[in-house]
Image (tube, grey):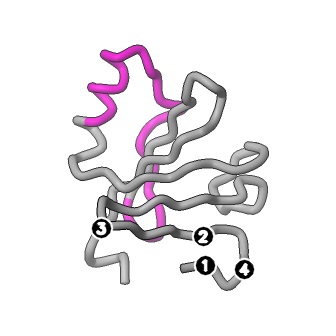
Amino acid sequence: MQARTGHWIELTASGGELALHDTTTAADGQGREGMLVSFTAEEPLETLERRLRAAGFHPQGTVVDQEWGRSLFVRAPDGTIVQIDEQDPELCT
């Protein structure tokens, strides 16, 4: 699936979904550049955030509200921004 704006695309597979976003045009881009990789969490973001911190990956900011649920951003070792989403079934159609 691709956004009507062309600024993001979702690739669905049997094991989940991978989304690529153009961060410079994202509503929550906050000055980021390039692309970011996005995953959907299967657990509450607070739980995931604790596990990330324990592994040495400190999220950028805090959990933020989005139009479809909530997100957490973390920088991968190669510098790539990874967005981890927690979708709210009542908001995500």
Q: Is residue 49 above or below residue 33?
A: above
Disc 1 to disc 2: CB gap under 8 Å: yes
Q: Nearer the viewer, residue 77 or 27?
A: 77
Name the element at disc 1.
Answer: loop
Mark 3 sits on what residue?
88
Q: CA distance from mark 3 to mark 2?
A: 19 Å
User: Which three-letter amino acid code belongs to the residue tagged 2?
Assistant: Ile
Q: CA distance from mark 4 to mark 2?
A: 10 Å
User: Which three-letter amino acid code belongs to the residue tagged 3?
Assistant: Asp
Instruction: Tell me the crowding category of disc 1: few under 14, some 14 to 19, or many 20 or more residues within 10 angstroms, Cα based.
Output: few
Q: CA distance from mark 4 to mark 1?
A: 8 Å
Mark 1 sits on what residue?
2
Name the residue furthest front: 14
Q: Nearer the viewer, residue 22 or 68?
A: 22
Instruction: Tell me the crowding category of disc 3: few under 14, some 14 to 19, or many 20 or more residues within 10 angstroms, Cα based.
Output: few
Disc 4 to disc 1: CB gap under 8 Å: no
Residue interval drawn in magenta: 48-69
Disc nearest the viewer among 4 and 2: 2
Residue 46: image x %, image y %? 27, 38
Mark closest to the chain's N terminus, 1 or 2: 1
Question: Which mark is drawn over residue 18?
Answer: none
Horizontal relation, residue 82 to residue 65: left or right: right
Mark 2 sits on what residue?
9
User: Which three-letter amino acid code belongs to the residue tagged 1?
Assistant: Gln
Disc nearest the viewer among 4 and 1: 1
Dividing the picture into quarters, in which one does residue 28 lie?
bottom right
Residue 19: image x %, image y %? 53, 61
Question: Where the N terminus falls, by quadrant?
Answer: bottom right
Name the element at disc 4.
Answer: loop
Q: CA distance from mark 4 to mark 3?
A: 22 Å
Mark 4 sits on what residue?
5
